[in-house]
Every structure is written in structure tokens, then in C-alpha cells.
Amino acid sequence: MRNPPKPEDIAIGARIRRRRMLIGMSQEKLGERLGITFQQIQKYEKGTNRISGSRILQVANVLDVPPQWLLVGDEGAEGGELPGGDHYCREAWRMVAALPSPQAKAAALHALKAITTAFEAPALQPEPA
């Protein structure tokens, strides 16, 4: 009989799954990039198979996060949870994360800032006394 997954392995797998989904990558695509099957990705994400140090480095590289984030997490750091994660925020995040270069991401950020400025509520004027 197999030993149950360790909490640490489950946590690492959950971070892999969260980041993979956040950037809109399928298990198949991640497996392909790592040279393994999607079934192996499923086992990693569930914590049923442990991940070697070299594999953690590979996964971190493909998911574009620091390896230590996969190991210890940091929900406020890059690669973590989305603040205010409604559908629109998650979709915008996925779209920007999928852009191919830092220049494209910077351009998207600039466009989002312009949109935000255009839709800001006008400042409230104090009522005359």
C-alpha cells in the first residue's frame, strides 16, 4: 500500500496547478514542454508523485516563476494569487501573461493604465458651506 501524499508535496502541486491555470496553460502543454505526459503533471499537481529538484527548476522555468515560489510560495509575490480575482481580472492577467515579450507586456500595461484613467470617477467637489 502506498503512503499518502505529504502536505508539502500537495502544496507544491497546488502551486504548479494555480500558476499553470493562471497563465492559461493546459496540463498537456506543460507536459510537452517538460518532455513528460499530462498524466505525470496530474500526479505532480495532486502531490501523489514527488518532484525532484531538477524537475522543479524545469517547471519553474516553463511557468516563469522563481523555483523558491514553487517550494515555499508567497501569495503576494509574482506568480501568486490575483488580488480581487474576479473573472475580468483573471482573464486580463492571462492575456497579458501570454504575451511573448516584456515589450508587449509593457505595451499592454500602458494600454490598461490609459483605460483606467479614462474610466476613473471624477473627484468629488466639496459642497459650498
Image: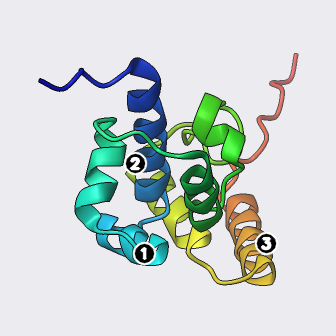
Q: Is residue 88 above or below residue 26?
A: above
The spot of residue 42 in percent (x, y) is: 27, 52
Helix, strand or loop at label 1? It is loop
Return the residue at label 3.
Answer: 110
Tell me: 109 left or right of 60.
right
Q: Distance between the residues labelled 1 and 2?
A: 17 Å
Using the image as rendered, state which of residue 39 and residue 25 is in the foreground: 39
Residue 76: which quarter of the image? top right
The spot of residue 118 in percent (x, y) is: 71, 65
Tell me: 52 left or right of 44.
right
Return the residue at label 1.
Answer: 35
Residue type indicated by callout 2? Arg
Tell me: 129 left or right of 104.
right
Residue type indicated by callout 1? Gly
Return the residue at label 2.
Answer: 17
Q: Nearer the viewer, mark 1 or mark 3?
A: 1
